[in-house]
Amino acid sequence: MKSPQVSDSIRQQLKLAREASLVLANLDNSEKNRILQVLAEMLRKNSALILAENARDMTEAYKMLECGELTSSACNRVSLNVEKIEMMAQNCESVAALPDPSGEIIQATRLDLGLDLYRVSCPIGVILVIFESRPDVVIQISALALKSGNAVILKGGKEAHNSNRVLAELIRRTLLKCKTAPENAVSLVESRDDVAQLVKMSSELDLIIPRGSNELVQHIQKNAQVPVLGHADGLCHVYLDQAADQIKSLEVSLDSKLDYPAVCNAAETLLVHQNYPNEWLAEILQKMQNAGVELRVCLDTRKRLGSYQGLKLMTADEDDWKSEYTDLIISVKSVESAEDAVQHINLYGSKHTDTIVTEDSELAEWFMNSVDAAGVFWNASTRFADGFRYGFGAEVGVSTGKTHARGPVGLEGLVIYKYKLYGNGQGVGRYAQEKRDFLHEKIPLAEQ
C-alpha cells in the first residue's frame, strides 16, 4: 500500500508538537498543576459557550441517527450538559493533585564508585489520540498529556467536531494565558486524510491511542507504522457462581449492565452456574427487562426459566457470545462450573474486564488468576474499570494488550523510562585492562 503524501501543514503541526513536548518535558510540576487548575476555571467560565457548540453538534447527530450513520448510544455520548462540564473541570483538578509521573527514579544501581546508573521515568513525546463521539475526551486526554509532559494531537469524530474544536481552543487559550508551555502542546486534526498521513509518520510520532469502535481500532492497528495502545472491544462478563450472595448478585449484575450500557466497561454477557437459584436469576433478568434490556439466552437458560411467564426470552446464537452491544441487550448463558465460565470468557472475551460474584474466596482468587483480562473483579461491577475510579484522575483509554500499559491507562501509561548514568570520566576499557569488577550495588531509593 502506497503511503499518502504528507502535507506541509501536517509536517508543521508535528514539528510544533515535538518542540512543545521538549518544553513540557522540562516543565516544573507546580507549573503543570497551575495550568490544569486554570483550565478547570476556564471550562467553568465558558460553560455556556461549550453547551452552545454542543447543541450544534447534537442537531447534526440526531440527523445522523435518523439516517443510520450513528447509533443511539454514540449519539448519546456526544451530548454535554452542565454536570459533564463540571466533571471535566474536576478531572483537571484531580489530575493536578496527582504526583508527577515524570522524573521518578524507578531503580538505582552503583556500577562502581563514582559511576551510578538510574532508571528514570520520562514522557513518551508526541501522542496521537483518535476517538469517537465523546467530546469530554478532549479534556481528559489533554489533562493527562500535560501532566505527564507529552504533546498531544487529537482527532475526534465529525459528529462532535464543534464541541471538540471549542474545547481544544479553550485549552490552547489556557496555555497562552499561563505563558510557560507552548499552545501547540495540544492541537486538533479534523479530517480522515490527516489521520491517514499521521499514522504513517513513525519518526515524528511516538504513540497512537485509538478510542472507539472495533472497526476504528482495528483500522488503526492495521495501518499504523507507529506503536498503538488500545482495545478493539469491551466484551465484559459477569459470572454468578452457585455460592453467590443474592443481594450482591443483583447489585453487581444490574450496575454492570444498566449504569451506562453504551461504554466499553458495561457487561455484555451474564454467565450463570447451573445451580444458581432460578428465582434469583429470574429477578435479575426481570429487572433488566423492566429497564428496557433485550434478553438473549442459551437453550439451557430458557429451559430453566420456562415457568417465569413475564420474561421475554430470545434465543442467543454464536454471534451473541462474540458481541459488544454497547446497548440495552445482554446475552445469558448457563454453565456447569466456574471452569466452564472461565473457558467461555477466555474464548469469547476481549481481555477487558470480567467479574465473579461468589462467597467462595478460594474460588474467587482462582477465577481472578485464571481469567486472561486487564481487569478481573470479585463481587464488584465491571463499571469500576475506569481511570478516574481507579484514582488515576482520568484515563486516555483502556489497553487490553500486554506491553507497556494494561487496563485503564492513566498517567503511568503516558511515561516510559530512560537510563541516566552519572560518571567521573570512566571508560569501559579500564575494566578489561585493569581487570576491575563492577560493583552492581543497589542504591536504596529512599536515599534519593
Image (cartoon, rainbow, N blue to C red):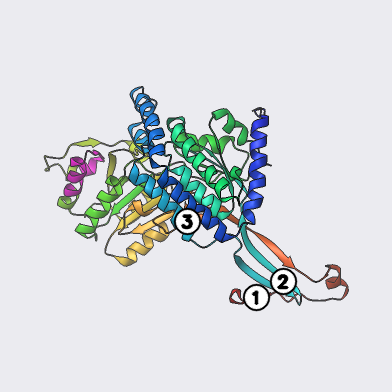
Q: Position of residue 200 (x, y in %)?
A: 64, 35
Q: Residues within 10 Å of mark 3 (few under 14, many from 20)?
A: many
Residue beneath disc 1: 443
Q: Position of residue 132 (x, y in %)?
A: 45, 36
In which quarter of the view is residue 10 placed? Answer: top right
Q: Earlier in the sequence, mark 3 or mark 2?
A: 3
x 66%, y 51%: residue:
22
Task: Left or right? Give the position of 75 relative to 175.
Answer: left
Question: Is the C-beta separation of discs 2 and 1 under 8 Å?
Answer: yes
Please identify the quadrant where the N terminus is shown.
top right
x 76%, y 75%: residue:
114
Out of 352 and 389, give the one closest to the viewer: 389
Residue 414's place in the image compared with 319, above or below, is below
Residue beneath disc 3: 95
Residue beneath disc 2: 116
Report the amino acid beneath label 1. Ile
Q: Residues within 10 Å of mark 1 (few under 14, many from 20)?
A: some
Q: Earlier in the sequence, mark 3 or mark 1?
A: 3
Q: Position of residue 143 (x, y in %)?
A: 50, 50
Q: Residue furthest top?
A: 67
Residue 12 appears in the figure: yes
SS at circle 1: loop
Report the amino acid beneath label 3. Val
Please identify the quadrant where the C terminus is shown.
bottom right
Q: Does the magenta segment cover residue 321?
A: no
Q: Mark 2 and mark 1: span between their CA atoms?
A: 9 Å
Range shown magenta: 282-302
For the residues carrying marks 3 and 1, which lies nearer the camera in this image?
Answer: 3
Q: Does the magenta segment cover residue 295?
A: yes
Residue 335 appears in the figure: no
SS at circle 3: helix
Q: Earlier in the sequence, mark 2 or mark 1?
A: 2
